[in-house]
Amino acid sequence: MLVARRRLLRLAVAVVDVVTLIAGLAVAYLILAVTFHREFAPLVVYAWLLIPITLIWVVCLSAVGLYHSGAYNSRYTLLTRLVEVQFIAGLLLFSVMYLTRSEAVSRLLLQSFVAISFVLLVTQKLLLAAYLCNARRRTDSHRRKIVLVSDPDKANRYLRLMQGRASLLSDVVRVLDPSSANGSRPEAPRSEVPFGGLHELPELLHDNVVDEVIAVAPLEQNVLERLSRCCSVRGIVLRIWLDLPCPALGHWGAEYLGDGVFLVSLAGVPQNPTHLLLKRSIDLLGAAIGVLFCGIVYMFYGRRLQRESGGSAIFRQQRIGKNGRAFTLYKFRTMWSGAERQQITMGSRNEMQGPMFKIRNDPRVTTIGRSLRRRYLDELPQFWNVLRGDMSLVGTRPPTADETTSYREHHHRRLSMRPGITGLWQLSGHGRINEFEQVVKLDCEYIDHWSLWLDIKILVRTIFKIVRGDGC
């Protein structure tokens, strides 16, 4: 609920920012067209400017942290960040106009917009800061009333956190020390919030308006049972505050397993079961179609590949999949039979820096193989790997077993999702990337930003790439 409230607040601020920017452009136009009697086209002609303007400004405002309530605690910090936003966003806007050669747009109009929007944004942000400050001080009946169950040190930490986040705005009715569960009177610390013992909870809930009880872990089992019993009987929300390390990657999540057991997990890869099921469904549908195309191509090229390469038309190689699972990858054979053994003697010609082996014009590739590679037809047998569940249509590049033996710790993260037939690395162009770290960066970028929409965009771009026939 707190996360949803923070998101709603950020969305509301972003909407107000967009409205402010629209007003800034309109005011700039009116000042120039009316006050200075300049000849301008109708305002609707410049409406398209709102697209780059809103995108640039919202991204910059977000980048400097102005969509976090903590940024509004200091007026000096607020003004400093707004100056930074206006300078960077203004440069980006003029750069876009220059690169797109939008000569029809008045430069004076853009300069006026930058100045006027700055004044409007400063005014709007100061008003918002004043509102948040006033909201923190209000003690009316609409504020959430909270009972905090915590030891004094952690209670003070929560109170400080509450003061810096608008989404946590509430009135703490009392802080109860769980160590006094047996009725002993705790030593009250210096605090503006009343302090008491846990034995006071039933009476406190009876005599006061209380919306939520927040308990700071760790707590003994009998204390949790007592809290849950008191809150559930009255229909009051009970929240457990856990102190967990801030992860460098991924996010924490909790899942209820039943019988009062929760599983808290740190996930650095997509976990939404519905989205993953849809991804797998798309994989199965696409793989079924791909296998049919593979059969057609095999009918035309199968015997020719055997004759020219001196081996079977289907090439098999051990690859490493999700979380280190070994599987057999299938491709049409595009090199001479035994080409893998020659790789040892060709190490000096490797164009990739790192454990990955890649040569742009590999002499081991046959004539027909080069033709298949140009249209990526050599990848068609991998649709069978997709049907088997070893791979996905879109994913990371599947490494060989030899590559993974030289991996450093952060390289293994690219194995946390199923490898794919296509992906960001393939779209970036094999020949333009000559460092393995760039491959890892692209694979991790795909994992961090994965969505069904991203998969669809990659598939569409891959189709265009196949049509152009610019494979290697």
Image: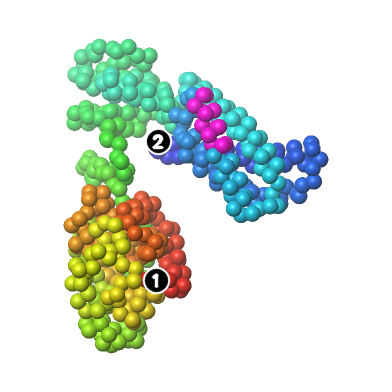
- In space, the residues marked 1 and 2 are separated at their CA atoms by 49 Å
Dividing the image into 4 quarters, which one contains the C terminus? bottom left
- Please rate how many residues cluster around mark 1, counting C-alpha atoms within 10 Å: few if below 14, some from 14 to 19, many from 20: some
Secondary structure type for disc 1: loop
The percent coordinates of residue 140 (x first, y second) are 49, 21
Which residue is drawn at the image coordinates 28% and 28% (left, top)? 216
- Please rate how many residues cluster around mark 2, counting C-alpha atoms within 10 Å: few if below 14, some from 14 to 19, many from 20: few
**Residue 71 painted magenta:** no
Q: What color scheme is it?
A: rainbow
Number of labels in the image equals 2
Q: Which of marks 1 and 2 is nearer the N terminus?
A: 2
What stretch of residues is rendered in magenta? 75-87
Residue 471, which numbered label? 1
On screen, residue 41 above or below 463? above
The percent coordinates of residue 230 (x first, y second) are 28, 28
On screen, residue 295 above or below 166? below
Residue 67, which numbered label? none
Secondary structure type for disc 2: helix
Which residue is drawn at the image coordinates 38% and 14% (left, top)? 192
Chief secondary structure of the magenta span? helix
Camera-nearest residue between 147 and 278: 278
**Residue 79 painted magenta:** yes
The percent coordinates of residue 288 (x first, y second) are 34, 74
Camera-nearest residue between 416 and 104: 104
Q: Mark 2 points at which residue?
A: 2
